[in-house]
Amino acid sequence: MSTASTPEAVLALVTTAHLGFQATVTVLVYPALARLAGEPQWGRAHEQHSRRITPLVAVLYPALVLSGAWLVVDGPGAAGWVALLGVAVAIGATAVSAAPTHGRLGRDGPTPALVRRLLLADRVRLAGAVVAAAGAGLVVLA
């Protein structure tokens, strides 16, 4: 029987939801968007993607920050810190690379370098999401 605290359980729930979201973006959404690079429909597709994904990001990312902060206050163990590291990687890759790259793609259009940068940032986010969910899962299962 698990003795996970409420902050640990909440972080596990949020990181699992984020992993599902991020895996969908990495495996389905971004490859479809990247295939349109250089095509006439790129601008419309990128704008629609940005508009449609914003509400999901606006819910998941604050939930990651708040549940992570709650765990910090609660006092995470080793697996909790691993989860928090994964959260930091995912959020950091978004803030430092993916979001600014989306801005440039929207303004300047898709260049091969910008599309590669976006796909790389996205893979880093996925790795962070995997680490976060695995760490949080270990906390709950311990």
Image (spheres, rainbow, N blue to C red):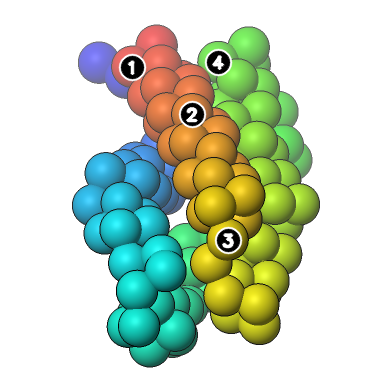
Residue carrying label 1: 141
Residues at circles 4 and 2 in contact by the CB criterion of under 8 Å: no
Question: Residue 58 has which mark?
Answer: none
Observer able to see residue 99: no
Quick check: marks 1 and 2 in contact, CB under 8 Å? no
Q: Quadrant of the N terminus?
A: top left
Q: How many residues crowd mark 1 within 10 Å: few (<14), some (14–19), many (20+)?
A: few
Read off the residue under disc 2: 127
Residue 13 location (% of width, % of height): 36, 45
Instruction: Classify 10 Å Cα crowding around label 3: few (below 14), some (14-19), many (20 and above).
Output: few
Q: Nearer the viewer, mark 4 or mark 2?
A: 2
Residue drawn where x is 66% and y is 28% of the image: 85
Q: Position of residue 93 (x, y in %)?
A: 66, 45
- Asked whether, in this view, residue 133 is left or right of residue 93, the answer is left
**Nearer the observer, disc 1 or disc 2?**
2
- The alpha-carbon separation of the residues under discs 1 and 3 comes to 45 Å
Between circles 1 and 3, the one closer to the viewer is: 3
Q: Earlier in the sequence, mark 1 or mark 3?
A: 3
Pointer 1 or 4: first along the chain? 4
Q: Are marks 2 and 3 in contact (CB under 8 Å)?
A: no
Q: Residue at x 35, y 83 (%)?
A: 40
Quadrant placement of the C terminus:
top left
Residue at which label 3 appears:
111
In the picture provided, is 35 more to the left or to the right than 9?
left
Q: Which comes sooner in the sequence, label 1 or label 2?
A: 2
Q: Amino acid at mark 4?
A: Ala
The part of the image, by quadrant, that contains residue 79 is top right
Q: Is residue 37 left or right of residue 113?
A: left
Give how far apart the Cα atoms at labels 1 and 4 are: 10 Å
Q: What residue is shown at x 30% (from left), y 58% (from top)?
A: 35
Secondary structure beneath dot 1 equals: helix
> For the point 60% across and 20% down, which residue is it?
82
